[in-house]
Structures are given as C-alpha cells and as structure tokens.
Image: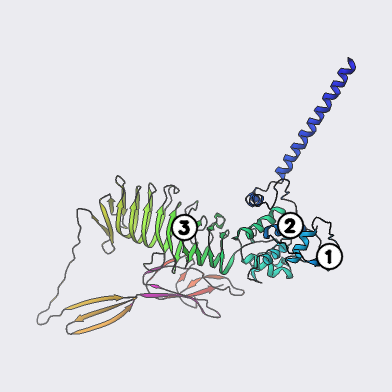
Amino acid sequence: MFLQKKFNIRYIKKYVIAFILLFVYMFMQMIIIYADNTSWADKDLNEWHEAGLINKVNFRPSDKITRAEIASFINKMQEYTEKSSNIKNYLDVQFNDSCYQDMAIALGNEYMSGVSNTLMNPKGHVTREQAMVMISKIALLKSDNVGYLKARDANAVSGWAKEGVSTSINNGFVLGYEGNIFPKKELTRAEAVIMLNRKRTDTRVFGLRGIYDLYGTIVRKIEIKSGGITLKNAKVIDDLIIDAEVGDGEVYLENVSIENNVFAYGGGEASLYFTDIDVKKDLEVLKKDGKIKIVSKGNSNIPKCVLKSGASLINEVGNATNIKSVELSSDMLNKQEVKLDGSFDKLTNNKEGAVVKANGSIGKLVINAAMTIEGDVEIKEVIVKKGVKASVKSKNGKVIKLDSNTKSLNYISKKQKYKSSSSGSSSSSKSKKSHSSSSGSSSSSSSSSTTSGSTKTTTTTTGSSTTTGTVTNKVRVIYHSNYGAGEIKTYEMNKNSLHFIGTYELTPRAGKRFKNWNTKADGTGTNYNVGKLLRIKHDLNLYAVWQ
C-alpha cells in the first residue's frame, strides 16, 4: 500500500513537472514572438502569406536574410524557372543542397552572381544595397546613376552599386529613414519582403527629397512620404497618396494622371502644387490640423475635391476651374477654416457650422447645412435646403441671410456690398449719370469695347476723332536664376490671376544658398518669399537672391 502511494506520488510529480515545462516552453515562445514583433511589416507579410510566397509560422521576420533565402523569395515572386548550368562552377553549392535550384535560377536570370569565380556564398547575409541592385535588375527599369545622391548617406554607397541603388530609389522601391538608406546594413527577412512587395504590387513609395521623373511610366499606386518631393510624368491606375508623414512639407505633382483618387493627408500652408494633373475621381483632403494649401495650376483637371478637414484651395490661372467642385463633408473636422481663391463651378456644404472664406466666383452654391461665407465672391446660383440657415458676410461687415428663396449672390466690389436676387422678387442698382457743358462749346465722348480671345479692343470717340487700341489681358511672371543660364521659368496667365511664389525648377548654385526672390537683379527691389500668394496685374520679373 505504501509502495503504491509512493508510486502514485512519483507519477503525479512527473506529470506536474511535464506540465510546468510545457507551460514554460509556451511562455518562452510567446516572449520570443513578442520580442520578434514586426507589426510595421504585417501588411506585407500577410499579403505574401496569402499569396503562398511565405509561411508566417516560424517566419523569423527579424532574422538577417541570406543570399539563398532572398533568391528563393525572388524566384517564387517572379515565377522564375530558367537555370544556369554555370552553377556547377561554384564549390559551395552542391547538387543535393536545398538551395541548389534557387541559386541556379538566380544565376540564370542574372540578378545574382558569385562573390568570386568559385563561390556563391549562399549562407552569406544580404546588405540593403545588394538588395536594391537585385530589384533594379528584376524590375527592368530605366537605369540611373545619380539617384543615390538623394540619400544623406550617399557617400556610403559602393561604387559598383551606385547605378542599381539609384535606379531603385528613382523608381520608388526604396523608402529610407530620415533621409538615409543605410546601404551597408544587413537586410532582415521582413525588410526584404517589404522591398520586394513594392515590386510585386507595383506600389511606388517616395521618401527621399528630390525630383522624380518617371518618364511616362504606368504604375499601379504611388505613396509620397516626405516633403520636398517633385513627381513628374507618371500615369497611376489606382490611388496616389500624399501621406501624413509629409507633415508641413511641400509636394509638387507635374503632368501626372491618376485614374482613381488622390488622398492628401499631409502638406502645410505653402505645400501642395498640382500642375497639369488629371484626376479621374476625387481629391480627398484630411489634414488633422486643417492647415494645408493646395494650388492647382496649368491645365489641371480635378472634378471634385472632398474636404474632411480645413484647407486652402487655389485655382491659380485666371477664371479656370481646375478644381471644379468642392464638397465639405458632413464628417469634416470641427472648427477648421476653408479658403477658396479663384473660380469654382460648384460648392456643396454638408458640414454644420462651416465657415468658408472665398475670393473669386462660385457657379453653384448648394447649402445642405448651416454655414457662413465671407469675402469677395460672386455666386451665380444658390440652392438652400429648406429650413437651413446660412449667411454671407462682406469685407465691410454687411451680412445677407440666405434661405431657400435665394437664387444668386453678386459682390459689387466698388460699393463694398452684396446684392442678392430671390425668386418672386428682383433687385436692381441705379447708376448715376453726369453731364458737363461749357458756354460756346460742347464736347461728348463715347466708348465701346469688344473682347476676343486674350485681348480687349477699346474704341473711344471724342468730338470728331476716334482712337482704337488693343489691350492684352495676358501677363507673365518670369523667374531668373540670376546666374549662369539666366531665365529658368516663365508663367503666362490672365491679368489679375493669383500666382503662388515657389522655387520651381531652380538649380542650386554651388557654394550658395537660395534666400528669396527680388524684383531687381541686384537685390535692391521688392523681396518675395516662397509661399507668397500674389495677384498679378502686370508682368513681373523675379530674380533669385543667393547668400
């Protein structure tokens, strides 16, 4: 009996110990998984897992990736099968090795070569610059050899890698961190998946300051993650995202076509410049502090801008309605101001208590929620939802209440007040006539004008003489580099257009730093800082000031 109890106790102890060991093992595994947490890479890892390219179980995302492993990743992603018979020349890869096929395929598709004539080094770790070179080769991109200079640590890039690194950067496959690309740092397995997934999904990401010319390339998606970026000549078949990481930085889009939407989550009060862009769907703006300025220029076409935060929108060129329709969303952030400069075909307000400061004209104003409009604006048609209260306030403080009977609203700038027309009533303004005469003689004058194209022809008759002159309605802003080649950019626009002062295509001057623009080459004229908004009434020459 005693022996049986002793046996049972030992038996129970064994199970208890086994249970404790199992618990400790599971706990340690949880610690390891937690310590290996790469939530920043989850999106890409999940996509690869779902595509059958990796198995997330025991994936070890933080481990350094080997040459054999990245070859396996690339071969699966690209569906490469062609092998090179030259693999037999490498002594460290044997036929029975698990990496033999992948290394032979890597050689056959020429994105990897040996580290020497006889060694492939399949277990060697891959540096970031080596991975960039591989991506440039499998992507078959337009080659470049100066793009690496966008990185702060450009001097660390190996000579043999400069072309591949430049090509990968300029085509949006390398993001960088705080302006650095860390070319000699060994790549982790998670980082490898992220870089390769940009190629697989054709998602281009730009995070290093500089000019990116895609030369008409058609891409699926673009994400801009830093200020100081100019993107040119691209066609995007999905969305273009200006990320919140841009902060208050500047982004320039030039000759870019977007088949879907543009999302602006970042940018400051002197920030987003859209020149000759074509957006097929919506421009959606959501900047948390509401301090973002979007300037539309040239022949841009933006059918609708949906504001979910405050913003300043500028249609720069004359009466052009590049941003055609503006909609204030019902879920727009509270107590944020909206500014509109230029001509807009339509403004729709769905935000209760919205305040809009407008300068220019609005073709149709649709008011579905209470709002206030301030400024110098002509509104050609007004539709107010029944029961909704709205008002317009002029510069001199005069307030006009709007209701469902209001049909239009015109600002009379000389008299500093508004007049409105409503259904069932009419309003008119009287004009004063003045006559003058003198004894023994009389004089009379009349004038007529016709407008055609960009010129206005004025005919004035005084007594028996008639004078006809032609006055142009076009003005120019001419930027001069003030050294070397001289003039760098000329913008022609209608008289009284709004123009935003920028740096545009100004090339840095060796040993000098750009300060501002001045109306005289010697710097003794009027200074204009980048970000200044001007109404151009006559030709304006601006000269770069260097220090």
Q: How many marks?
A: 3
Image location of residue 305, percent across then percent down: 43, 57
* Mark sitting on residue 88: 1
Q: Secondary structure at mark 1?
A: helix
Image location of residue 380, percent across then percent down: 29, 60
Q: Nearer the viewer, mark 1 or mark 3?
A: 1
| Residue 322 seen in the current view | yes
Front residue (pair 239, 180): 239
Label 1, label 2: how far apart the Cα atoms are = 18 Å
| Residue 500 drawn in magenta | yes
Q: Main secondary structure of the magenta part?
A: strand
Front residue (pair 36, 269): 36
- Pick the quarter of the image with the N terminus: top right
Number of other residues with Cα within 10 Å of mark 1, as a class: few under 14, some 14 to 19, many 20 or more: some
* Mark sitting on residue 72: 2
Image location of residue 158, percent across then percent down: 74, 68
Image location of residue 519, percent across then percent down: 45, 75
Residue at figure coordinates x 14%, y 75% from the top left: 436
Q: Earlier in the sequence, mark 1 or mark 2?
A: 2
Pointer 3 residue: 283
Front residue (pair 60, 410): 60
